[in-house]
Amino acid sequence: MNKLLEKKKYTISDMEIINKYHILDIYLVYLFFRTQNSLKLFRIILNITKELNMSLLDKINFIRNTIKKVGKQSYLSNINFVDNRVVLVDEGISHIYQNIVTGKTQNNLKILILINEFISLVKLPDEVIVIDAPTPIIINRLKERGHKRLSSYKDIELFVENSKRNISIIGKKFPKIKTFINKEQ
């Protein structure tokens, strides 16, 4: 993300905007509920959460993070930059697919159907940029960095496999998508 920001002087990250204007999480929740179809979206979020095979705390985080992502998207879509600035959103609405991937074996088909319904109800970003990497590099990064839901090498492999599958699904759901491959270790 930082390398992308350095390349273009008219590029700003979503967090720079959120921090500059001191946008609080509670305001993002407020913006979520002001969006069109917010009650339908909230119902879908709850239905997805019921299907997730994770702890109660992780489910609560999923609900909170999803609501914040939609609120942030709503906020950012209403900004008119006079200099045609590009806003890069790290883990925006498209990342909801990734939030459902767990290291454990889980049939995500029902969840993916719900997420497709969810995404059809929200205002999509203009373009989605996917920064991918070869599978062995991603596995090594996750091993080095650690992940609270991935305790074994097998869990990491399954997580990466599911992530790659979900990225291909994202490519079919968003109108403009670009993929960059990062081979750095």
Image (cartoon, grey):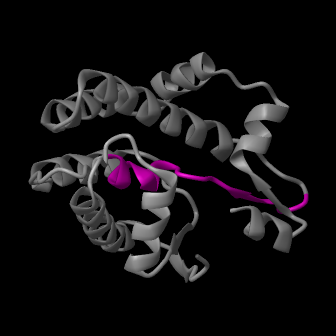
Quarter of the image for the C terminus: give it: bottom right
Query: In front here: 85 or 80?
Result: 85
Does residue 59 appear left or right of residue 123 in this picture? left
Q: On screen, 125 above or below 127? A: above
* Nearer-the-camera pick, 112 or 143: 143
Q: Is residue 145 above or below residue 84?
A: above
Q: Residue at x 43, y 53 (%)?
A: 95
From the viewer's perspective, is 130 left or right of 51?
right
Based on the displayed image, in which of its 4 quarters is residue 58 positioned?
Answer: top left
Q: Is residue 138 above or below residue 57?
A: below
Picture residue at 48% right of the left edge, 78% below the top: 133
Q: Percent x, y for residue 166?
A: 30, 65
Judged left or right of residue 79, residue 110 is left
Q: Quadrant of the N terminus?
A: bottom right
Seen at 15% across and 30% down, the residue is 50
Magenta stretch, residue numbers: 83-99
**Viewer-nearest residue: 127 or 63:** 63
Residue 19 belongs to the span the image colors magenta: no
Residue at 32 percent of width and 22 percent of height: 57
Q: Is residue 78 above or below residue 132?
A: above
Residue 167 spot, x, y in % from top left: 36, 69
Report the side of 75 relative to 97 (left or right). Answer: right
The percent coordinates of residue 20 (x first, y second) are 84, 34
**Residue 11, picture quadrant:** bottom right
Residue 96 is inside the magenta segment: yes
